[in-house]
Structure formats: C-alpha cells, structure tokens
Amino acid sequence: MRTAVIEWLNSTLPNLNLPVNASDEEFRTLLADGTILCRLMNKLGHGPAIEYGNPHHSSEAASENVNKFLAAMDEMSLPHFNISDLEKGSMKIVLECLLTLKAHFMPNVAIGSPKCTSPRSWGIDSSRWKQFDEQSGASDSLGEELSPRKLQRGLRSPMISEPTSAYTHHAGHKFHEVFQMKHGGGYSDLPASKISELMKSNSLDVITLALIAPTQSLLSMVNGILDESISRKNGEIPHQNNLFKTREEKYQSRIRVLEALANGTSGESTEVINHFDHMKMMMSPFEQIKVDVTRTGNSKDSALQTDKTTLHEEKKTENQEVKRKMNEKDSTSAEIAALKQELENVRKAHKDHCLQLENDAKKAQDDLEKTLQEVENHLGESKRKVQQLEDKSRSKSQQWNKKEHIYKTFTEFQLGALKELRFASQSVRQELLKTQKSYTEDIGLLGTKVKVLQDAAESYEEAVSENRKLHNEIQELKGNIRVYCRIRPFLPGQKDKQTTIDYIGENGEIIVVNPSKPGKDSRRSFKFNKVYGPHATQAEVYGDIQQLVRSVLDGYNVCIFAYGQTGAGKTYTMSGPDNGSEEEWGVNYRALNDLFRISQSRSTYKYEVWVQMVEIYNEQVLLAEISAFIALTYIIGEKICMDWVKRETCLAVPDANMRQVNETSDVLGLMEIGFRNRARSTTSMNERSSRSHSVVTIHVRGTDLKNGGSINAGLHLVDLAGSERVDRSEVVGDRLKEAQNINKSLAALGDVIFSLSQKSVHVPFRNSKLTQVLQSSLGGQAKTLMFVQLNPEATSYSESLGTLKFADRVSGVELGPAQNNKASSNVKELMEQVASLKHTITKKDEEIEKLQVSKDKRNGHPPIAMEKQRSVRYGSSSPVSKGLNTRSESMRVGRMSLDGHTYGYRPKKGPSSLHGEDTDNSSVASSVESSPSHEGSKSFHSTNKPKSGNRISRPLQKISKDLPKAAKGMFKSTSGSSVTGKSSSKKWSS
Ligand SMILES: Nc1ncnc2c1ncn2[C@@H]1O[C@H](COP(=O)(O)OP(=O)(O)OP(=O)(O)O)[C@@H](O)[C@H]1O
C-alpha cells in the first residue's frame, strides 16, 4: 500500500523521486513537514492553491502545512488522518487517507464493479468512512450499489480543473441524461444539438460516462457530433463537405480500430482507463477542430491541408501510442491484480480484525455491562446504605438534639439548684459556726457534768460492790441451807383435784392437810425460806435465786438441787418442760445465760466458764453422751474454745466430746441433748420420770484485770431422781433396782444432811455417789439451796409429808459461813512456788528411792519395785506418785473430786475409751487431781494419805504461815486431810 502511494506521489509530483522502498518511518519523515502534502493538493487542483510555509523555519510551519492539507481534505468531505497519526503510531491511516485521495482524483474503476463501489474497499478505516458519509450526507452502506452522488464523485477526474457545486449539479444532470440515453436505446437517438450541447459543456465527465457506455453508442455519439459540425460547416462552407466526409471515413476507420481494441478489453477497469486516455487524446483533435471551426470559420483550405498533415502525423503517433498503451495496460493489469490481491488480503485481514474487534468489543461490552450492572447494584446498595445512614444520622441528630435540650434544661436546673445550694451552704455555714460555738459551750458544760457523773459512777460501783458484799455477808451469816418449796399445779386432764396444800404463807409458811383424815391433828405446818404456789412462774422462781447464782462470779461455790417425790416437778423447775419456750426455761438455762451475760458485762474481770454434765444412774457416774464437758471461755470481747479443758478438767474424760461454743444457745442446745439422753422411764406418778440424778456443773474462773487476782467457783445444778414408794408403785426387776438405788442415794443424802445438822464429826458423804458429788456443796463453804417439790394430789400426801419433813431437816442444817475463793496475785505466786516445791520433792523422792535400791542391793536384800515403794508411801493412786497435781492450787477449788472412781459411759452411741480402758480405778485417778479444799476429796485419798512426817505437809504448813487468810483456808483443808481419811479406803464400785 505504501509503495502504491509513493509511486502515485512520484508520478503526480514532478521531481519528487521518493524512494519506493521507504519504510514507514522514512515515509513519515518525508511527509512530516507537510510540504509534499500541500504540493500534492495543489497539484490535484483542489480549490485555491495552498500556500505552505517553509518547515525549516519553524515546527509550527510544518504542522500548519499539514493542517492546511487536512482542511482541504475536510473541504472535500474526505476522511483524513489526524496530525498525531503523522507524528507517531501506525502510518496505515495516513496511507489509507492518501489512497482515498488518490481514488478521489483517479478513480480507476468501472461502474458496476463491486470491487470499486465503496471507498471502504480501499482499506480506509470504517469510522473514517462513517465520518465521511455523515459529512457528505450519504446514507448508503458498504456493498450497496453506487448512488448518483457516488457516481458523481467517482466521475470527478483530474481533468476537471474547477469542480464546483454548480458543476457537480450540472455533471449530475448530464450524467442523468447520458444514463437515460444509455437505457433508452443509445446515443444515436439523441439529436446532434443535444450532443453538441454536451460537448459544449466541456465536461469530460460526460465523455467519461459515455466511454463507460458501449462503444457503439459512443461512436454514434461521436458521429452525431461530427454530423452536426459538418452540417453546420456545410451551411457555411459548402466546399468543405467533401473534406469532412473524408475525415469522417478516416475517423470511422480509426474508431473501428479503437472499437476492436475496446472490445478486447471491455469490462476491465484498466482498459477503460486506457481507453479513456486514448479517447482523451482522440478527443483532443476534435476539440481542436471544434475550436478551430469556431475560431476561424472561414480559413478553409489552408487549414484543411494542415489538418491532413497533422492527422497523418497523429495517426502515426497514435499507432505508437496504442502500442505503448498496450504495454502499459499489461503492466497496469499486473499491478491491478497485485493490488486486488493485496486488497483482498487487506480486506480479509480487516474483516478478521473487524471480527476480532467486534468480538473484543462484544466481550468488552459484556464485561462493561456486567461491570455496569455490578456498579449499578453497588450504587443501588450504596444509595440504600446512604439512605439508611442518612435516616440513622437524622434520627440520631434528633435524639442528640432532644438530649441536648434535656441536658440544657437539666444544667440550667442544676445551676439554679447550685446557686440555691451555695446560698444554703453559706447560711448553713453560719449556722454551723453558731452551733459550733454553742456546742463548745455545751461540751464544756458536759465535761463538767461527765466528771460529776464519773465520780457518781465510781461511787455507785463502790456502792454496788458494797451492796453485793453485804448481801453475801447476810447470806453467809444465815449460814443455813436455803430451802424453797414449790408446789406443782394439777396436771391438765387430772380429774381428782383434791389437794393436800391447805395454806401457803408469804413468809414461807406452808400447811398441809391429810384429806383422808380431816381435822386439826391432820394439819401439819412447815416453814421454809420461800414457798411457791402452783401458779408461780419460772421467771419468778429464778428471780429469787438470781443473786445466789451471780455470787458464783464473786467466787462462791453454789449448789442448787431439787428434791421431791417422782412427778413433783423437779425437772420442770431445774430444766423446764421438754421443748419449752424461753418463758418456760428452768433454772439451769437461766443461770447459765445469766452467768454469760454478767461475765460479759463486767469489765474488770476476765472470766472463763466451763460446763460439765454428769449423770448418776444406778450408782454409776455417767457422762452426758454428746458433751460430757463443754468448755466456754469468756474473755472480755472474745470467745475461745479452750482445748485445755481436756487437760485441766477435774474429771478424767480423755475422749469427751469437745465443741467450740460461741453462743449461749449453743450451750443450751448441747445441754438439751444431754437431758434428752438422760435415763428416763415411766413411773406410776410420772410418764417421763428421770431415773438418774443429773448434775450440771458450771465452773467459773475469773481474773481480776486490775490486780491480777483470780477467783474460782462452781455452780452445781442438781436434778435428783424422784423418790418412789416401791410398795406403792409395785415395780420389779430393773425398775425395782433403779428405784432402790434412787431411794438409797436419797437416804444417803438424808444421812449426810442429818450428820451435818447434828454437827457430827463424821459426815457419811461416801455412802453414795450422789453425796460424794454434792460433797463440796453440802459440806464445804458453799451456798446451798434446795427446791422442795410437792405434788398437791391427795394420794401423794404421805410422800409430800415425808418430803416436807426431809426439807425441814435440811433447812436446819448449818453449814457455816460460805467461803470466798478469791486469791490475790501473791497467793498465786505462792501456789506456784508450792507446785515447784512439790516437783522438787518428787525428784528428791526418786533419788532417795534410787539410793534405797542401791543400798538394798549392797545389803543383799531384793530390790523393792518403785511402784510398790510408792504405794507404801503414798498409796497406789497418789496424785503425787503419778506426777500430777502440780498445777495451780487455785484451780482445784471449784473442781469436783471424783478421784478413784470408775466412770461409766452410756454405750448407746459410739465407743469411748472410758470403756474397758480407763475403768481401772487407778488409771482414772491418775488423770484426776484431788481437790485439797474439800474434806471429801481428802477422804478419797485416804489410801494416799502421807505418813506422819510426810515431806509434803511440812513445807506447805511452813508456807501457809505466810499466806493471806483465804489461801490459808485452803491449806487448812489440805492439812486436815488426814482427819477425815478414815473412809478413804472405801472405793466406789462401778
Ligand atoms: N410448776 C409446774 N407447772 C406446770 N407443770 C408442771 C410444774 N411442775 C411439774 N409440772 C409437770 O408435771 C409433770 C412431772 O414433772 P417432772 O417430770 O418435772 O417431775 P419430776 O419430779 O422431775 O419427776 P421424776 O422424779 O419422776 O423425774 C410434768 O409433766 C411437768 O410438766
């Protein structure tokens, strides 16, 4: 394509001589300055000549030249390239443009040939063509038949020097006419004048069209023209007719030749071109003739002659020219074939390219559509989100506005409140200052008053202490066992309500009467410390013994026991009914509660309270099942469970259940369990008769926080088993044995009391376990109170009378003044010295024993066993021999001395080491220390009685001289141990 263009340029522009094989880039360089393009346009004769600048002067001139060329192309409504196409990229577009231009000015195709009907077949870009078509107003498409407009365009030739619009119209008209002629039967039908007119129009287009028509028609047309010319000439120059005729013949012969030539090449575009050229040359003489005819008119002969010669020469030239044309034709045909091939290739490539492009475009379009769809979806989604966000932000903003409004209102309100507060605070401050001032004054006054009160409190405490002291002194002075008589009410559902109680006096007088023997003689009067009628409440009863209970905290031993026939209300008075309410609590609970409360309230003493429960059943000492020992320790403000109770207790119960007791209710709960497990059975008088003596002992140890002194005391709360007339109850077997044991122990109690009232030297405490247990309360310096319980029923008159007689005897017993078990800190120290001395003595004894053994060995005597020696000296169960009893003497004061006894244990629940293991008297005794303050305790150790000259007694007696009175009392007892040691050989049988 490039070669064709270059050749065309070379042929069109003289002296151009572009290299035919120039590359794209070289060709670009050649065309870049635009001069060739402008020259080409000028040469082709389009419009006024383009004035192009010298590109060597400036680059602007080069682009201006190119632009001018492009403007000219534009004017011709031809597709053209862009200036950028010339500067870079493919030269294909530029080449196509130039080919279009070439085709525009040199259409070398025959009408009707599909190969040349469309400029697109020339390889010009379809878009450009589209542009071109739009510019030119054409609406035809590729492959369509040529429209007249296209034909007009195609008919333009370089021969037309001024192709104006008028010309175009004219040419179109002419063509139409020629076309009509062609289809209407040939040019021969046209009048000569018409042909002449056509000729006059000087339009070679018409001629060209004519050439496209069949040669015969063309010849007819030429003949017509000649005929007209000749006829005209005949009119003017008659003599020239012959000449013209001759010429006509000549021309006709030539035409025949041409026709022959034309026949050989008809249909071929190249031939048409050649023919066209030939015709042009042929027409030249005609033109010339025409001009000559017109111009000269009358120069006839001379001109004819010249013409003859000229024609002759021309004929020759024509022949040569025909030959040359033939050659050219061949070469052109080959070129055309090559071009056709190239065109076909290009078309094919173009088609493929188009298909490829179309596919790409389709694919791209699909992709684009898809992307577009996605983008649209995305956009829709985004829009929706935006809408949502907008709605949300709108609602938020509304909320915030509301909140802002609320906050504003709130802030304003707060500010107002703050102002008010500030104002109020100022007034309050002033008021505060005033109040402070008055307070200061008041405090000053209060200080004075407090001082007065303090003085008063001190004196009050002193007064209370004095009062207590006086009360105790009164009680001590009385010296007797206090006896309170209580009469049980008739039980609900009891029909016979005949009572034996005739009178109850305020002063403790009671008169009973035998309902079966009414009369003066049957009335018996008794007088006790207090008599309670059937309606007396538990609180009332306890209120009267409260001071007595509290004296335990002052260091007095207290014993409260209930005596009476079975079913007379002993257990009710001491413990209260089963599951009773707080109002029904008996003495035990109230006393314990009271002691806890008071021990807590006293700030000058630190108290430790132990609780111990013992049951005597069938002359056996039993430990309460759940809690044989309950230790409570009260240290002001804190409660501690003391495991030392196990070690320090006066009873050897190594496996006794120990529980930490934090509240009074805990103790009460445990006591309840103990009572519940008490031996009970039904008697004729009582459905739930207690068949054992219950002894609850509360040990109190107090330390004076001021001077370090201490007190030790015990409260014995004894609920005796009920006496029973065996003949009346008619019991047998175990029940009979129970009753006999109970009666026996009560009789022993009576014996003890009788002995005490008679001030006998010997008091038979050891006759029963009961008297042994109560020994410290009855025979020592204790305060003792007995509740005498009476059954008011007439049937129980004789039992009630016996009870009253017993109580009367008891009330006559003088125990002597109660002794306070207080010891000062000096005494304590002395006690400790005693203990250490005892320890030293023990060691010395051991050394002596060793010496004795070695001496015996030397003398040839067999060595005496140490135990035997010890038993000789102190007895087998001596606490000294066991290395015990070295603790504080003060601790012994309140302890029960059951040394040497076997302790039974109710086998109902769980094993105990007491069974089998510790039932041996000596082993039990080994862990129990004797109470030196009691006679009885000394009597228990009668087998341990030291011989005269006992090493222990002497230093103790010596020390006792230095002790204060209270301590002396204790030593007195200790030293007197040998006095009542007669019955000590008696052992409690288990
Ligand atoms: N003051 C009283 N008010 C109301 N009921 C009483 C009173 N005294 C005793 N009772 C009731 O009388 C019954 C017998 O009382 P209680 O068991 O205390 O006698 P007891 O002397 O302990 O008998 P025992 O020696 O056989 O054990 C019980 O049901 C008890 O509730």
Image: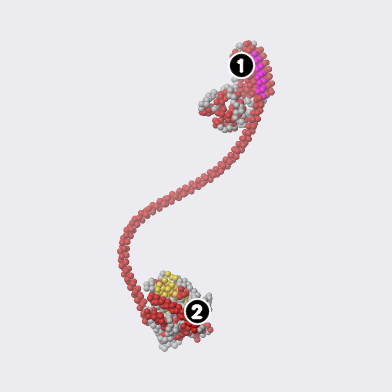
- Residue 790 location in percent, x, y? 44, 82
Residue 778 seen by the camera: no
Q: Main secondary structure of the magenta part?
A: helix
- Residue 249 location in percent, x, y? 67, 15
Label 1 sits on residue: 288
Identify the residue at image location x=33%, y=60%: 432
Q: Amino acid at mark 1?
A: Gln
Q: Amino acid at mark 2?
A: Ser
Residue 377 seen by the camera: yes
- Residue 902 location in percent, x, y? 50, 80
Q: How is the image coloured?
A: secondary structure
Q: Considering the numbered disc 1 on the image, is that residue within a helix, a strand or a loop?
A: helix
Drawn side of residue 448 relative to residue 904, left or right: left
* Image depth: mark 1 or mark 2 in front: 2
Q: Are marks 1 and 2 in contact (CB under 8 Å)?
A: no
Label 2 sits on residue: 923
> Total marks drawn?
2
State the separation of the CA atoms marked 1 and 2. 180 Å
- Ligand 1 under 8 Å from disc 2 Cβ: no
Q: 701 or 281, which is in the foreground?
A: 701
Residue count near mark 1 (Cα–Cα under 10 Å), binned few <14, some 14–19, many ≥20? few
Q: Which residues are magenta?
A: 308-330
The residue sitting at the front extreme is 858
Q: Quick check: 842 above or below 138?
A: below
Query: Within the magenta stretch, is there residue 281?
Result: no
Residue count near mark 2 (Cα–Cα under 10 Å), binned few <14, some 14–19, many ≥20? some
* Lower sequence index among marks 1 and 2: 1
Drawn side of residue 558 relative to residue 274, left or right: left
Drawn side of residue 368 relative to residue 250, left or right: left
User: Which label sits on residue 378?
Assistant: none
Q: 620 or 304, which is in the foreground?
A: 620
Q: Considering the numbered disc 2 on the image, is that residue within a helix, a strand or a loop?
A: helix
